[in-house]
Image: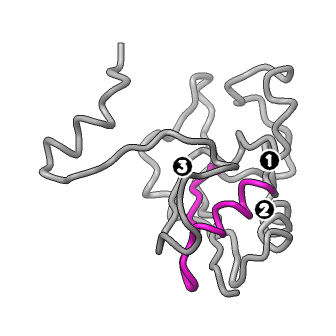
């Protein structure tokens, strides 16, 4: 079984000092204008209230700070590679979001210079899902705090 605390041991092994703080993404325990960068991976699709989380993340970013959210790309084509059943995923508005949906939410949350950027497929380590079918490439959901 994979070590769930691996995220805590890796920085120590590499000589990096990291402080982990557990909190809700909709109500972060940080002052306004604290961070230059907010990065997440495979988190956006799990947000039950994307507009609330995105506004909160923007609040803690400094002016000119950036949000980077890494997700697998989605297309209009139906897919059968989702990991969970529909009942579990139904409360997640960004579950199978297309680029236009992400940019709409970023705009509503007040981000500037927002975009969804296709990542080079060479950056994907895992190329196939459990069903043997090719997995979608990665994309980066990007927004800046400009105001």
Mark number displayed over residue 94: 1
Checking the image for residue 41, the label placed there is 3
Q: Horizontal and vertical percent for residue 147?
A: 70, 87
Q: Which residue is situated farthest in the top direction here?
A: 1
Left/right of residue 145 with respect to residue 1 in the rendered view: right
Which element is circle 1 on?
loop
Q: Quadrant of the N terminus?
A: top left
Asked whether 85 falls inside the magenta stretch, the response is: no
The residue that disc 2 covers is 102
Residue drawn where x is 63% and y is 32% of the image: 133
The residue segment tinted magenta is 52-72
**Left or right of 41: which side holds 84?**
right
First in sequence: mark 3 vs mark 1 = 3
Q: Which residue is drawn at 62% across and 45% down?
A: 43
- Up the image or down, 76 lies above or below 7; here it is below
Distance between the Cα atoms at labels 2 and 1? 8 Å
Image mark count:
3
Rendering quarter of residue 144 = bottom right
Q: What separation in Å lies between label 2 and label 3 (alpha carbons)?
A: 14 Å
> CA gap, disc 3 to disc 1?
14 Å
Residue 17 as seen in the image, left or right of residue 29: left
Badge 2 crowding class, 10 Å Cα cut-off, few under 14, some 14 to 19, many 20 or more, is many
Residue drawn at the location 59% of the way across and 45% of the way down: 42
Residue 94, image x, y percentages: 80, 47
Q: In the rendering, at what x and y percent does residue 141 appear?
A: 65, 64
Is there CB contact under 8 Å for labels 2 and 1? yes
Q: Examine the structure image and report whether residue 58 is included in the region drawn in magenta.
A: yes
């Amino acid at each position: 079984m994979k070590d769930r605390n691996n995220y805590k041991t890796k920085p120590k092994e590499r000589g990096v000092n990291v402080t982990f703080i557990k909190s809700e993404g909709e109500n972060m325990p940080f002052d306004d204008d604290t961070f230059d960068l907010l990065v997440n991976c495979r988190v956006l699709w799990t947000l039950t209230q994307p507009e609330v989380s995105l506004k909160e993340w923007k609040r803690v970013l400094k002016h000119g700070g950036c949000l980077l959210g890494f997700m697998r790309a989605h297309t209009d084509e139906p897919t059968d590679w989702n990991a969970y059943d529909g009942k579990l995923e139904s409360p997640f508005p960004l579950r199978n979001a297309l680029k236009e949906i992400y940019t709409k939410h970023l705009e509503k949350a007040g981000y500037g210079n927002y975009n969804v950027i296709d990542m080079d497929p060479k950056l994907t380590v895992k190329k196939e899902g459990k069903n043997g079918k090719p997995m979608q490439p990665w994309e980066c959901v990007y927004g800046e705090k400009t105001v």
